[in-house]
Image (cartoon, rainbow, N blue to C red):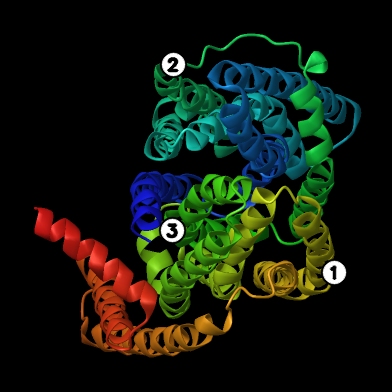
Amino acid sequence: MSKMLKSSGAMGAATLLSRLLGMVREMVYARFMGDGLVASAFFYAFQIPNLFRRLLGEGALTAAFIPMFKEKEMQEGEKAMWYVANATVSALIIACSIAVTLIIIFSTAMIEGVNLGLKTQLFFGLLRIMAPYVLMVCVAAVLMGILNARGHFFIPALGATMLNVVMIAAVFLIAPRFGTHLEDKIYGLAVGILIAGVAQTLFQFPLLFKEGFRLRWVNPWKNETVHKLMVRILPGIVGVAAFQLNIILTNAIAFGEAPHVVASFNYAVRLMELPQGIFGVSLATFMLPMLSGLAAEKKYGEFQSGLRQGMGYLIYANWIATTMTFVMATPIIRLLFEGNEFNVDSTARASLALKCLIPGLVAFSLVNIIARAFFALGDVKTPMRIAVFSLSCNLIFAFFLIPAYQQAGMGIANALSSMVNLGLIFYAIRRKFPNMKVKEMIQPTLTVLGSGILAAFLAWALWKWIVSMIETPSVWTQLTEVFVPLILGTGFYAILTYWSGVPAARDIWKLLKQKLDRN
């Protein structure tokens, strides 16, 4: 318990800093370009390199690579381990370079050979500039995976901080050099993303060098472990490719609707990713090497206990984030984003998208953890098959809901498909481990659910009361109407769950008490 909470807590601290800077970036972006046509074109174009990052740099590749990396270290020593790491990075550079070249060629052909509207021309123009980001961010993701496998979580998570710092600086230092109109300045933002990708990649190298890694070209085609890795990740690549295609098609549907839909939904996603990243992604990232080690040693009892415990912590942390965000969506978005290009209507659109998306937060995060358990066992096929089915459901939901409900339809489709995914993957892990003692989770989970709803109702009532007392709105009144209900509501939740004996609440309190006693 202590090690899991401390490691995910250390990584969570770095992730919190990164996510907070990411939120500052989104605040700057919102005021810079609002949620109109230019913003939607930019966010949609930026999704393409991000999708390749998940296809080649994260997901199936890192999930399959970390267990094999650990296994190589245990069986053949560090020299063989670093050789495999270089072979994997070399293979990734080849794959990403091909992808970048194809994106640039296709984007150029579309711009020069087809009569496009402003929105579509902007999309392909931005995509062409941002294409090399694929290479940098994919390599950075694998380097972070290597450091995670070596027991380093804080510094790799901090790498994303560099990314956000450069992206924020690009709005003020690079974008104005490209012109006076937003349609011109947006290209400066795309250039800033390339510089940010370089910064994030280089940030990993000092610690890697200290660990003993030396970047060298290794012919991946002659490496047996790389061949094994490719065979193992192939089902995962198919699953992730289905996921990426699903996102592209879903956003294509949205991009063809009103100009604001993609941008409004993007702001909602960024807000949801704050709680998801602080604890959910941090915990899942820590659990993969931990579960991989237990699986390699065939300690399946501890494996199941660790998975069950991790799920409990995640439900506890993310359920209160779900309920609080749902009732406080409008004041949160008004405080963070409203101003300049982002107006009152923009706030209403983004808050509606957030309310429809946030009910899927716990499901999104639980799927991430359970999928890591399968990856640690060397089973990539099961979670990816389930993902393909769930994403097919998402596409069907999106096809019917987006034309009718726009950004709200995108949120509902994503939340529903994540719940389908959770139901199926949970059923699959239960079949693999029939004696996982899931019944022990029922009572604490019900207590957490009830406590979260009560805390959210308290926060909502406080918010309404504070708003009724405000005569002259200002930044300070906005801060008050957001933070007072959130702090008091979350405090009420913590006390109620601790008093009710929820294990996650007790464990977190013990860890905090130990730190306070030490100081």
User: Where on the picture, by quarter, is residue 474?
Assistant: bottom left
Instruction: Give above or below for 471 relative to 264.
Output: below
Q: Could you tell me which secondary element the residue under label 1 belongs to?
A: helix
In the image: residue 200, left or right of residue 165:
right
Q: Give the distance between the C-alpha atoms of the residues marked 3 and 1, in whole angstroms.
A: 30 Å
Name the amino acid type tagged 3: Phe
Q: Are marks 3 and 1 in contact (CB under 8 Å)?
A: no
Find residue 211 and report its horizontal and vertical position in percent.
Answer: 43, 21
Q: Could you tell me which secondary element the residue under label 3 belongs to?
A: helix
Q: Residue at x 76, y 11 (%)?
A: 219
Q: Residue at x 32, y 69 (%)?
A: 507
The residue beneath circle 2 is 209
Chain-order first, disc 1 or disc 2? 2
In the image: residue 324, left or right of residue 431:
left
User: Where on the picture, by quarter, is residue 5?
Assistant: bottom left
Chain-order first, disc 3 or disc 1? 3
Crowding at mark 3 (Cα within 10 Å: few <14, some 14-19, many 20+): many
Name the amino acid type tagged 1: Ile
Find residue 332 and report its horizontal and vertical position in percent.
Answer: 39, 68
The residue beneath circle 3 is 279
Q: Could you tell me which secondary element the residue under label 2 belongs to?
A: helix
